[in-house]
Amino acid sequence: MSDSTEVLASAPTTGPAAVAAGIRANAGAADEGGRGSGLRKGIVAIVVLVVLFAVPFVANSYLVFVLSLTLVYAISTVGFNLLVGWSGQIGLAHAALFALGAYGSAISVQHGVPFLITIPLAGVAAALLAVVIGFPAVRLKGFFLAIATLALGMAIVELLVFARPITGGGAGMNVDVWTLPGITGSASTYFVILVVAALTFFLTRRALLGRFGRTLQAVRDLGSLTGSLGVSVLRYRLVAFGLSGFIAAVAGTLYSQLQTFIFPAMFHMNLLVPMLVMVFVGGAGSLWGPLVGAAFAVVIIEFFQDLGDQQAIAYGLVLMVVIALLPGGLTSLFRTIRDSRFGTALLRRKPATPVPGTEGTAAPETSVKEDA
Amino acid sequence: MLQTIVSGLESGSWFALLGLAIVVVMKAADVPNFAMAEMGLVATYVGISLAAAGLPFWITVLATLVVGIALGVLIDAALMRRLSKYGHFPLLLMTIGLSLALNAVVGLIWGHDPRSFPAPWSGVSVSVGGGVSVGVSQIVSIVVGLVGAVAITMFFRSSTGAQMRAVAENRATARLIGVSAGRLSAIAWGIGGLIAAVTVMLQAQSSLVSTITPTSLIIYGFVAATMGGFTSLIGTFVGGLILGVIQQFVGAYLSTAAQFSVALLVVFLVLVLRPDGFTKGVRLRDV
């Protein structure tokens, strides 16, 4: 919005000093803009949260279930997106870590551990396992990493079948549902999921917008070159694995509560593929992508549920169309629209906000030309 | 014992061939094709339908191969090529979406019942001393696998194959010296579709195929490709054969439920110990 003022301010000076001033001024403007829209975003977030909290009181149980499922997938996708989008590692053990959370929580609850405590416990366990799984990341890149982690993830799910005495084997196991006092089952689960989802989004957003997220991106884009900046590539890659594993397991614990019955076949490719779809359709490496992607996937799944083979065709086709038309994901569409509207708004607003000390409205236009 | 080895070599040939198809596409077009087995399945089902309509066996084989090639070229031209500039992730997802859609299309048209591709020699077996008898279809699988591997290796020695290797090595430089990357990726996809059609057809003439066949076949194909480091054709072929034999032995002496896990373990060990494929450094590189 105030880009033109910066350009004007730095116009009289020349040389590197001008560049530095420009950068400084731009940084300030960005921060200011960020803070302004941050406040607006905060208000929007609170309004959305309040609306979401009111849902169980007005909507039927099916809608509550669909919303819960969307939020659980959104949480899981936040973790997956952190790994795939922000750190650039295609680690495909996410469904297995999700399963670990679901089973870990269900088994612990059976042995008398309060459910709410199993959320962080399962998260930490999965984070440790994810770091172990991610260890090949030291040596492997791209598809090799994808296949190694895919193999390990599938092996973990296979193990769940073999560990029949604890997990019930392929037949699955019942989950003891924990409820808030005085609230019915599905609504209670929904509230827990909503709180965890809000926390996850808030914390991840803070982490990714700050130093951590930028370093992750640098490691993703520059690879071992960041070592020369004193950033340990290995550490950041493993931290990304651990964090994504933690979030996956947290989502898994909630998923088990939501489904009330879990079996290993739930966590095979038929879960991993939608997870990839959610990351991708939402937009890999974006902040709000996971929510959009999860909503998209759940709507598609629910919408085509009764169609059998046609569901799979529709699912495959929708996936293909979205990828073909929007290789940057759905959020890239929003960004494109916003940027273009923002751009026109910027041009229209310039004459209306003349900079103090300049006369006439022609100046900003010339400065834009210089800028270009 | 011998029986187990032959069965292992038979299924190993399928894995090896599919692995080779994956590697060929990977080399030229830089796409890990998760829809490879489904492409073969579609082609094979077309062949089965033609055979059911009364066409002679060899005509249906030819038709199956043509459908495989056409499918590969079509997918490349219509879907893959314009995505290639967006990096690996969209391509990977596109093949996943494609595999879902193709599988469902097959289920919708032909149903989910297992089918076979009856060949003149299906069900015939020859005894090879010691009271062991080997099915002719098993021998056909192994021989065709071997011939296919040799043919693909020869192809990469040819001029087109050399161009393909050049593109795989460095796309930009290859284009600068006048190599058409687009034409090569179409050729690679055509070859990939051809091999995939052969693979599924081999499986169908020996046992049964259905819409659940591709799921396991593609994973074993990727295991074989991984063992070759996604570049070595010999490594992929030998890797596929070894995988098939290991798998049959695990199935015979341990449990059939463990077959899958053992295959996964093999991948992981290969990737951690020798990420470039287990034959890397064993053979001399031709410069």
Image: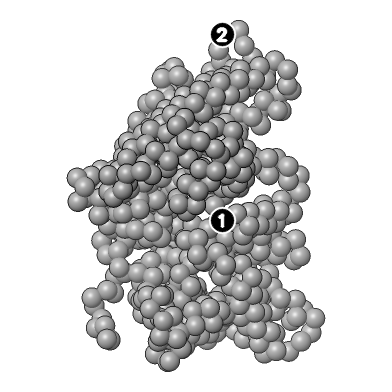
Give the residue drawn at x 56%, y 8%.
A181
Tell me the chain of label 1. Answer: A
Chain at numbered mark 2? A
Sequence order check, earlier mark of 1 and 2: 2
Circle 2 packing at 10 Å, graded few (<14), some (14-19), many (20+), is few
Looking at the rendered structure, the secondary structure element under dot 1 is loop
In the image: residue A367, left or right of residue A325: left
From this view, report whether residue A354 is shown above or below residue B126.
above
Left or right of B23 on screen, residue A20: left
Q: Real-space Cα distance between discs 1 and 2?
A: 46 Å
Picture layout, residue A46 above or below residue A2: above
Quarter of the view holding residue A191: top right
Disc number lying in front (1 or 2):
1
Name the residue at 51% across, 66% down. B84
Marks 1 and 2 close (CB-CB < 8 Å) = no
Q: Which of A226 and B116 is in front in this view?
A: A226
**Is residue B97 visible to the viewer in this orientation of the structure?**
no
Which residue extends farthest right? Answer: B53
Q: Which residue is drawn at 45% across and 65% down?
A: B222
Residue A81: percent from the left, percent from the top?
Answer: 46, 43
Counting labels gives 2
Q: Residues within 10 Å of mark 1 (few under 14, many from 20)?
A: many
Three-letter amino acid code at the position of disc 1: Pro
* Residue for point 71% across, 23% down: A61
Q: Which element carries disc 2, helix, strand or loop?
A: loop
Q: In which quarter of the image is residue B246?
A: bottom left
Q: Is residue A87 left or right of residue B32?
A: left
Q: Dot 2 corresponds to which residue?
A: A181
Name the residue beneath numbered marker 1.
A327
